[in-house]
Amino acid sequence: MSVLANVFVALVALLHAYFLVLEMFLWTKPQGLKTFGNTLEKAHETAVLAANQGLYNGFLAAGLVWGLVHPNPAIGFQVKAFFLLCVIVAGLYGGYSVKPKIIYVQAVPALIALILLWLA
């Protein structure tokens, strides 16, 4: 169960690393425009905000990776749990304030990882 939990934590970390790339580097590119449903004009107007948001997603990914590689399993558990909770809160707020789909893309995978982590 521990391996499965860590696989899910790693998947959540990879998702947030991907969000970083989308928001920091692809925001005004075709893939970013399509993913977020933006026009090129709107994307250029919001690029700095998106890059800042992408950086925060990178911090979430880094925290999850830190929890995965921490040499002390008890501390690693706490770090993973903390950052998964942060992802869940961010996903719920994004779903409320931006688009409900964010709950399914961001919060639900983190919730599954957190449940698996607690069961491990």
Image: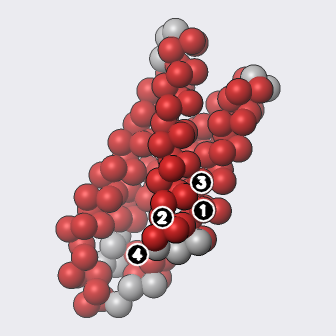
* Secondary structure under the numbered disc 3 in the rendered image: helix
Checking the image for residue 32, the label placed there is 4
What's the amino acid at mark 2?
Gly
Residue lying furthest top = 72
What's the amino acid at mark 3?
Ala
Q: CA distance from mark 3 to mark 2?
A: 9 Å
* Secondary structure under the numbered disc 4 in the rendered image: helix
**Disc 3 target residue:** 107
Q: Earlier in the sequence, mark 2 or mark 1?
A: 2
Q: Are circles 2 and 1 on residues that touch, CB within 8 Å?
A: yes
Q: Is residue 16 above or below residue 116?
A: below
Q: Are circles 1 and 4 on residues that touch, CB within 8 Å?
A: no
Q: Are circles 4 and 3 on residues that touch, CB within 8 Å?
A: no
120 vs 57, left or right, is right
What's the amino acid at mark 1?
Ile
- Pinpoint residue 64: horizontal percent, then vertical percent: 49, 34
- Pinpoint residue 69: horizontal percent, then vertical percent: 50, 21
Q: CA distance from mark 2 to mark 1?
A: 7 Å
Checking the image for residue 89, the label placed there is none
